[in-house]
């Protein structure tokens, strides 16, 4: 199928009618930059910060840092997390607008998705088309040393039939580092978001509308290197809030008992035994403080815990980089009726580059997560994933992803889940300013709990404009 975009109207015909009305009014006023800002809404990160995140990606585990652990002193900056649109050749990357010490990089995407199971349900399965406008405003520093970046990312989702699930989401973030010396660096980041919990989240009690989530995430750490030794000390403070939602009969589903602070401290040390290999020790302590002492079922879900791991870090330039860590983790709950969660922890994340055009990222992780399930203190997730990304041409990048997740509720029997996930996507850049993409995804959950199993197939195409 070919699409000829010879005029603004020819583009609007491929967009949801309510989105088209917004864009027509903006285009008619010749305010394309304003259009980017006007539809700013949404967070690609925020949903994953719910108690149990959308699809298969849970919230930040209780008692563990969400960071990927590599031989680097600060492993949190993982090249694998970059979006595919930034992986095409430099000649197809946007040039941006130069503002002296900063570079301004605006971007907007138009997407059309079909979801075969909008509510992630086993019965009364409903499919629908979803139109999306996603916009980004990025300001990147160009200092000779140090760094400071600002980002505003938005997404507006409009369903063709089930308009009660329409969403407007927003994420604003700032991050940077200060190079105190050649061996010492201070990193700071802060992110505020407003988003919605996915319908397929195990913690979502189906309301008329998705559950709104808001949060502020703050992280500060210091990296120190000396000969073969390296050290990282980090403090993280996260604030998460959830809004109440109504049911179809008008009753209220309370969610404010999930509002909380999550505080953590992490220490990481590494010693390079010989070139490319290091011994790694990492310890994380955490505390979760809920606004309400008792939740809707009368449980005090406040908790504290730790995660201690040791292993080997590998950094073989241009070939493989990553860590393999083993240890233990425990989460202790204020309420004596909630069982202590924890056990053997395992984390392995590797970036393997067999060629200049291909990267393979396998990972293994076992963590515990907060839950609101009655009588359960937490759930234990064991995850095995692999991402394969290949550059077919300088302007074409294809990506495949597979995931296997096993979830066990602590303190509750016969509610374990096994989830399978597979995705394939492609990015094709015509010029540095214009690209298209497509994605096919499949998600399948098999649960011991009644009516909690489901299958979901999604297909998506998108058009991106950037400068």
Image (tube, grey):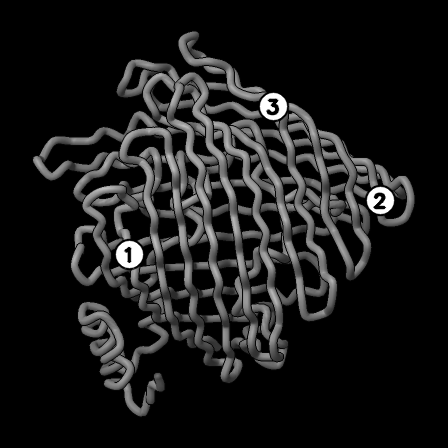
Check the image and report above or below for 92 versus 183: below
> Which residue shows up at 20% across the image and 77% down it?
25
Q: Which of marks 2 and 1 is in front?
A: 1
227 to the left or right of 136? right
Q: What element carries label 2?
A: strand
Residue 147 coordinates in the image, percent (x, y): 64, 58
Task: Rate crowding at label 2 as few (under 14), some (14 to 19) or many (20 or more) other CA atoms within 10 Å.
Answer: some
Q: According to the image, label 3 marks what residue? A: 329
For the residues marked 2 and 3, what is the alpha-carbon distance in whole angstroms? 25 Å
Q: Quadrant of the N terminus?
A: bottom left
Question: What residue is shown with label 1?
Answer: 116
The residue to which callout 2 is attached is 277
- Report which quarter residue 448 is drawn in: top left
Say whether disc 2 or disc 3 marks the residue closer to the N-terminus: 2
Task: Name the residue at 35% across, 56% down.
Answer: 457
User: What is the x, y in percent for residue 437?
Assistant: 44, 72
> In this picture, is 230 found above or below 297?
below
Write the residue at 57% across / 43% down.
Answer: 384
Residue toward you, 172 or 333: 333
Q: Could you tell me if the residues under marks 2 and 3 are in contact, i.e. CB atoms within 8 Å? A: no
| Left or right position of 172 against 65 | left
């Amino acid at each position: 199928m070919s699409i000829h975009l010879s005029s603004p109207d020819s583009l609007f015909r491929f967009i949801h009618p309510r989105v088209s009305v917004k864009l027509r009014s903006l285009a008619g006023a010749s305010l394309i930059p304003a259009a980017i800002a006007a539809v700013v809404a949404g967070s690609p990160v925020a949903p994953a910060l719910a108690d149990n995140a959308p699809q298969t990606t849970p919230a930040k585990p209780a008692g563990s840092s969400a960071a990927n652990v590599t031989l680097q002193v600060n492993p949190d900056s993982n090249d694998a997390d970059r979006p595919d649109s930034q992986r095409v050749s430099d000649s197809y990357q946007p040039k941006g607008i130069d503002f002296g010490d900063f570079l301004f990089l605006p971007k907007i995407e138009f997407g059309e998705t079909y979801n075969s199971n909008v509510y992630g349900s086993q019965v009364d399965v409903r499919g629908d088309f979803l139109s999306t406008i996603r916009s980004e405003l990025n300001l990147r520093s160009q200092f000779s040393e140090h760094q400071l970046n600002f980002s505003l990312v938005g997404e507006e989702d409009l369903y063709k039939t089930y308009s009660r699930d329409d969403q407007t989401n927003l994420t604003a973030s700032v991050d940077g580092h200060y190079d105190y010396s050649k061996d010492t660096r201070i990193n700071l980041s802060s992110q505020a978001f407003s988003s919605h919990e996915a319908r397929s989240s195990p913690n979502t009690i189906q309301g008329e509308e998705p559950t709104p989530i808001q949060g502020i995430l703050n992280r500060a750490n210091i990296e120190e290197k000396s000969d073969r030794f390296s050290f990282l000390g980090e403090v993280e403070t996260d604030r998460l809030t959830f809004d109440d939602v109504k049911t179809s009969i008008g009753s209220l589903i309370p969610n404010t008992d999930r509002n909380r602070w999550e505080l953590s401290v992490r220490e990481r040390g590494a010693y390079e035994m010989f070139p490319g290999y290091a011994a790694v020790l990492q310890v994380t302590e955490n505390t979760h403080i809920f606004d309400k002492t008792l939740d809707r079922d009368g449980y005090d879900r406040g908790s504290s815990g730790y995660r201690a791991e040791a292993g080997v870090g590998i950094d073989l330039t241009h070939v493989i980089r990553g860590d393999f860590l083993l240890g233990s983790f425990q989460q202790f709950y204020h309420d004596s009726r909630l069982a202590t969660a924890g056990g053997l922890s395992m984390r392995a994340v590797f970036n393997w580059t067999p060629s200049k055009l291909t990267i393979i990222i396998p990972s293994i992780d076992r963590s515990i997560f907060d839950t609101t399930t009655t009588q359960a203190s937490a759930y234990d997730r064991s995850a095995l994933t692999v991402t394969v990304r290949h550059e077919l041409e300088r302007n074409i990048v294809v990506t495949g992803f597979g995931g296997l997740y096993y979830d066990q509720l602590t303190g509750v029997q016969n509610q374990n889940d096994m989830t399978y996930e597979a995705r394939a996507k492609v990015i094709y850049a015509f010029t540095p300013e214009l690209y298209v993409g497509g994605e096919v995804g499949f998600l399948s959950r098999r649960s011991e709990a009644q009516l909690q199993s489901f299958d979901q197939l999604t297909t998506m195409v998108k058009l991106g404009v950037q400068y």
